[in-house]
Amino acid sequence: MNPDPEYTVSDTSFSSLNLPPTMLSNLADLGYKEMTPIQARSLPHALADKDIIAKAKTGSGKTAAFGIGLLLKINQRDFGTQALVLCPTRELSTQVAQEIRRLARFKNNLKLVTLCGGQSVGPQIGSLEHGAHIIVGTPGRIQDLIRKGKLDLSRCTTVVLDEADRMLDMGFYEQIDGVIRNTPKKRQTLLFSATYPDGIKKLSSDLQVDPVEITVESVH
Ligand code: ADP
Ligand code: MG
């Protein structure tokens, strides 16, 4: 792992990031004036296409820390799945999907599909038939849909593991590994976790290349 070079971020405004004007004005409309610490530390690396392993608490603004870069990489003319966010539960998947939609308000016709267990699979298969630029969901259901031949991740070059420690606590290691094996080797993998048990270190070394390591203690 690459410890994040010792630095304090002096400019925490989103405008320091060289984002497209449409994204900047949407962030202003959302009332996001300053980056939170995890955003200020992650976004420069995320936008530079680096792998990241980040330790940060709930409520620290992780979704925008990975969502902004993820959205900017989507080519909307390509209806293949280009980004995947794995979450531990349906509730968390729904929250992440909602926040990504808010961040993407300026993008018309962006297709984001949530795929979680505990819901019938038929409508999920139906929604995939119309194309999905971004998939958010839980590892088991996503693995099921890959096995059924309904989900192609061969062009999915951004992968996010959100709340990775909780996913491991729930016994999802094999499913996560199985899903990510279906994505290209050359991809960006972003891992967010509140804690770093050994399983997280193994997951990182299995799935990431030379990740930047970021630890943020404070939420705001
Ligand atoms: P986490 O995943 O770390 O728990 P979220 O991404 O869900 O955090 O963000 C928590 C809340 O903070 C959300 O309501 C989100 O809209 C808000 N938020 C995120 N970034 C900012 C920001 N830079 N300024 C103001 N509010 C923000
Ligand atoms: Mg979150």
Image (cartoon, rainbow, N blue to C red):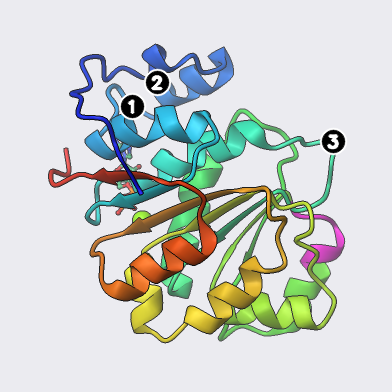
Label 3–label 2 contact, CB within 8 A: no
- Residue 64, how many percent across, how many down? 42, 40
Circle 2 crowding by C-alpha within 10 Å: few under 14, some 14–19, many from 20: few
- Residue 217, how many percent across, how many down? 14, 47
Q: What amino acid is at disc 2?
A: Ala
Q: State which region is magenta.
A: 127-132
Spatial separation of the CA atoms under disc 1 and disc 3: 30 Å
Q: Is residue 115 left or right of residue 126?
A: left
Give the labeled residue for mark 2. 28
Could you say which quadrant of the image residue 136 lies in?
bottom right
- Residue 183, how many percent across, how many down? 70, 60
Q: Which of 135 and 176 is in front in this view?
A: 176
Q: Is residue 33 above or below residue 94?
A: above
Residue shown at 45%/62% (left/top)?
205
Label 1–label 3 contact, CB within 8 A: no
As helix, strand or loop, the secondary structure at mark 1 comes to loop
Q: Mark 3 vs mark 2: give the one in front.
A: 3
Q: Does the residue labelled 3 lie within 8 Å of ligand 1?
A: no
Q: Does the residue labelled 1 lie within 8 Å of ligand 1?
A: yes
- The label shown at residue 31 is 1
Q: Would you say residue 82 sits in the magenta stretch?
A: no
Image quadrant where one finds the C terminus: top left
Circle 3 crowding by C-alpha within 10 Å: few under 14, some 14–19, many from 20: few
Q: What amino acid is at disc 3?
A: Arg
